[in-house]
Every structure is written in C-alpha cells, then in structure tokens.
C-alpha cells in the first residue's frame, strides 16, 4: 500500500471502520509511524464528539450496579516489596537469550491484530495493546528468549510486556517479572500465561538502562528470584 | 452519588480509578453513562446489547486506567472510543446490518441537570458542525460511526471506489475537526457563571 494511502487510514481507524485485514495492516504501520499515531489521536478526539449527537433514554439503574460489581470483583494486585540483590548474574540471561530469535515488531503486531479479531472476548487485552501501539512516547524494546516486546512510556517509565504464545505456568508455579537495575532485581508482577497473547503491566517503573526479566517461581511469587530467567528484554533506552 | 468527587476533572477521576478507587469509577459512570448508552444504543439498536457494550467499556476503563495518559487524550475521548469499539464489535457479530442507520433516535426529554444541559450544548455544537460538512462527507462519517460499517462495506453500499471512501472519511474528519474548533467551548468557562449562583 502506498504511503499516502495508508496515512489516510488513520481516519477510518479512528472511526472503527477498518475490516480485520486492514486493521492488522494499519496497526502494524502505527507501531512505527509517529505521524499516523498523532493523526489517530486527533481524529479520535473529533470522532468522540459525534457521540454527543445522540439523544437516548438513560440505561437501566441496574447497569450502574453491574459496572461497580465488575470493578469490585477485580482486586488490584498491589506489589510493594523491598529491593534485593539480583541472585544470579544478569549475563546468564543474555547468554540464554542469545540462542533465541525475537521476531520483528511489525510482524508481531500484524499477527496480533489478526488474532485479536478472533479473540474479542479478551477485549481488554486489545485495549492495552492499542494503547501501547498508539503511544507516541513509548519505547519498544525487543524481548530475547520469547516472542514479544517490552513497551516503556518515556515520561512515566511505566512499562508493560506483551508476550506471544507463552505456555501456561506449571501447576503450583507462576511467572514472575523483575525489573533489574544495577544488579538489583525488584519484583514487577505475577502472571500465568497460557493465552495466545499475554499482556503484563509492570508494577514498578522501568528506568533507563534497566532490563526486565521473567522467571518461573512458586505460586504466589517470591521477593527475589530463585531461578534463571526464561526470557529477558534488552536494556531500556 | 460519589458527590465528594464532583469537582474533579474527568482526567483526575481516571487517575483515581487507576488506583482502584471505586467511587471515582462511579463518578465517571454518572458523568458518561447517558452519552455512552445513547451511542451504544444508536449503533446496536437493542437496549440489552447496548448495556452490555457500556458495561464492557467501563470494565476496560477500570482495568486499563493506569495506561491512560492525560497529556495525550481527553478522558471523555478515551471512554467513548472504548464504548464505540465495543458497540461496533457487537453489531458486526450479532446483528444483520441495519438498513437505515441515519435515522435519529427519538428525542426524549432528559432530566434538567447540569450534565444534561452540558450534553445538549455539545450536541448542538456537533450538529451545527455536521450541517456545514459537504453532504457526501457527512454521509460517510455517519454511516461509519453510527452504522458500524467498515470502509469496504461503505464503498459497496454507496457504489463508490474504496479509495474515494477513504479520502472522503479523511477529509470529512479533518473538516469536522476544524469546524468543531471554531465552535469550541470549554466546560469550565461554561460552568463559571453557574457556579456563583
């Protein structure tokens, strides 16, 4: 598709008017086109005004309770643990990863968007990823040892990991993410995998020069890693 | 309800939601449920499906509030984008395509609240802007946004080449953005005279 033509799709994207294939192609393009991300952001704001050109009765009062019950059901994971020395050399992570090939982001995003269309039950996942892909200030850092990326917001240093095709953690085990900086590992969240796409919001900021690694630990997580990482990111920019 | 939060901006409420503040979510719901439900109902044309779309969107707000960055988007844009995406997903999956998506939903007298008045003002503003768009651009935007048609479906329906539809949506949105900017209203300015009474 020609460059000008794909830029035009930012309007259709903001209107949710792309078919599955076009959506996949455009989201892959968005991942590396700042100009389109800016267009999309501006168009989404314009498009949202159209929502006000609608007059309708109020929803049933029960809907409010349903919304709040949903929220209550989801307990946030709060992680506040002391920093510990990293229990194994970070070089081990790199050595492990060296044998593995990380796929390019464009392919990954495109494949992802295709899958998302089939996985609309996991709609919240799609939102997380769309935010990641359309965030003009985010750094995208490859993972080594797994198919995926680490996305880090430039301003807030907030990060999250998107991992493709991660097997479910064995019974009684969990995956645990770590932010490692100056040889110190800080726990950054637990997850179980098993979905074709796993999104891991990291619970601690990812500073410049840090890496993010993942180990398999006892269910419930640990305060410092006891295993070698199964995969890790390159250093955050 | 959640009255203690009424003075906060939408963006501040999202920041509280990111810290799992249920009252903040309730306040956001109270501010946006009417417009969210109206939008979803116009697209899916079924009250129960429309409520599902709104419920799903607010769950997404709850889950991904920490990812929302106020410097880059308005909270209202973000929430309504979530609602729209879900409504369109539902209508593409669960309903035969509507033949006449341009009809307006029947007008209902809303309760006379500040929120209601604010929505009426914004509605008048967007209607005025739409009126000034070239007919074909307005048609493309309305069919896509309220009808849930993809650009390819629109091309078929209107008997135009896909490239024409793409350009029309792009120019239409660019024009609409400019027209809306002319009639821009700041909520705080608008509220100013009322808050002293």
Image (tube, rainbow, N blue to C red):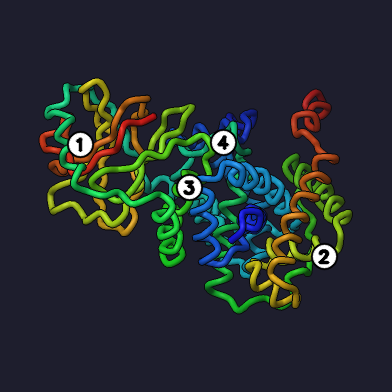
> Alpha-carbon neighbours of circle 3 within 10 Å: few (<14), some, or many (≥20)?
some
Relative image position of residue A69 (x, y in whole percent) = 44, 50
Q: Quadrant of the C terminus of chain B?
A: top right
Q: Is disc 2 on the same chain as disc 1?
A: no
Relative image position of residue A189 (x, y in whole percent) = 28, 37
Q: Which residue is mark 2?
A: B136
Q: Residue at x 51, y 59 (%)?
A: A25
Whole-number angstrom distance, CA of label 1 to CA of label 3: 44 Å
Give the answer, above or below, for where B128 lies relative to A185: below
> Alpha-carbon neighbours of circle 4 within 10 Å: few (<14), some, or many (≥20)?
few
Foreground disc of the pair 4, 2:
2
Mark on residue A68?
3
Q: Which residue is mark 1?
A: A94
Q: Quadrant of residue A225?
A: top left
Chain ID of residue with mark 1:
A
Whole-number angstrom distance, CA of label 2 to CA of label 3: 42 Å
Q: Residue at x 65, y 58 (%)?
A: A5
Disc nearer the start of the sequence (1/3)? 3
Chain ID of residue with mark 4:
B
C-beta proximity under 8 Å, tags 4 and 2: no
The reply, left or right, for residue A5 in relation to residue B104 is left
């Amino acid at each position: 598709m020609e460059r000008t033509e794909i830029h035009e799709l930012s309007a259709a994207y903001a209107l949710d008017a792309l078919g599955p294939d076009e959506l996949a192609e455009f989201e892959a393009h968005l991942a590396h086109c700042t100009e389109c991300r800016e267009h999309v952001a501006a168009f989404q704001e314009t498009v949202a005004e159209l929502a006000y050109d609608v007059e309708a009765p109020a929803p049933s009062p029960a809907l409010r309770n349903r919304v709040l019950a949903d929220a209550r059901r989801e307990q946030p994971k709060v992680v506040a643990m002391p920093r510990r020395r990293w229990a194994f050399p970070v070089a081990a992570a790199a050595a492990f990863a060296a044998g593995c090939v990380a796929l390019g982001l464009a392919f990954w995003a495109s494949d992802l968007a295709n899958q998302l269309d089939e996985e609309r039950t996991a709609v919240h996942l799609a939102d997380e990823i769309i935010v990641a892909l359309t965030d003009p200030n985010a750094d995208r850092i490859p993972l080594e040892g797994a198919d995926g990326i680490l996305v880090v917001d430039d301003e807030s240093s907030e990060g999250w990991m998107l991992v493709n095709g991660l097997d479910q953690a064995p019974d009684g085990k969990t995956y645990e993410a770590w932010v490692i900086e100056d040889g110190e590992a800080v726990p950054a969240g637990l997850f179980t995998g098993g979905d074709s796409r796993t999104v891991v919001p990291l619970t601690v900021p990812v500073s410049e020069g840090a890496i993010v690694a993942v180990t398999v630990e006892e269910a419930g997580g640990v305060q410092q890693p006891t295993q070698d990482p199964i995969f890790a990111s390159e250093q955050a920019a | 309800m959640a009255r203690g939060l009424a003075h906060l901006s939408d963006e501040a409420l999202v920041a509280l939601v990111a810290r799992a503040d249920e009252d903040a979510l309730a306040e956001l719901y109270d501010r946006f449920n009417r417009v969210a439900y109206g939008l979803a109902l116009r697209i899916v044309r079924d009250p129960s499906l429309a409520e599902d779309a709104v419920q799903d969107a607010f769950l997404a707000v709850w889950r991904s509030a920490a990812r929302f960055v106020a410097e880059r988007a308005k909270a209202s844009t973000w929430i309504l984008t979530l609602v729209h995406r879900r409504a369109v997903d539902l209508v593409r999956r669960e309903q035969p395509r509507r033949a006449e998506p341009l009809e307006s939903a029947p007008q209902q007298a809303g309760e006379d609240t500040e929120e209601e008045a604010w929505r009426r003002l914004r509605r008048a503003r967007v209607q005025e802007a739409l009126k000034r768009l070239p007919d074909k651009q307005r048609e493309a935007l309305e069919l896509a946004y309220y009808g849930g048609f993809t650009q390819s479906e629109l091309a078929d329906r209107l008997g135009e080449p896909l490239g024409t539809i793409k350009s029309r949506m792009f120019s239409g949105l660019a024009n609409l953005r400019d027209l809306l900017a002319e009639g821009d209203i700041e909520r705080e300015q608008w509220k100013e005279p009322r808050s002293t009474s």
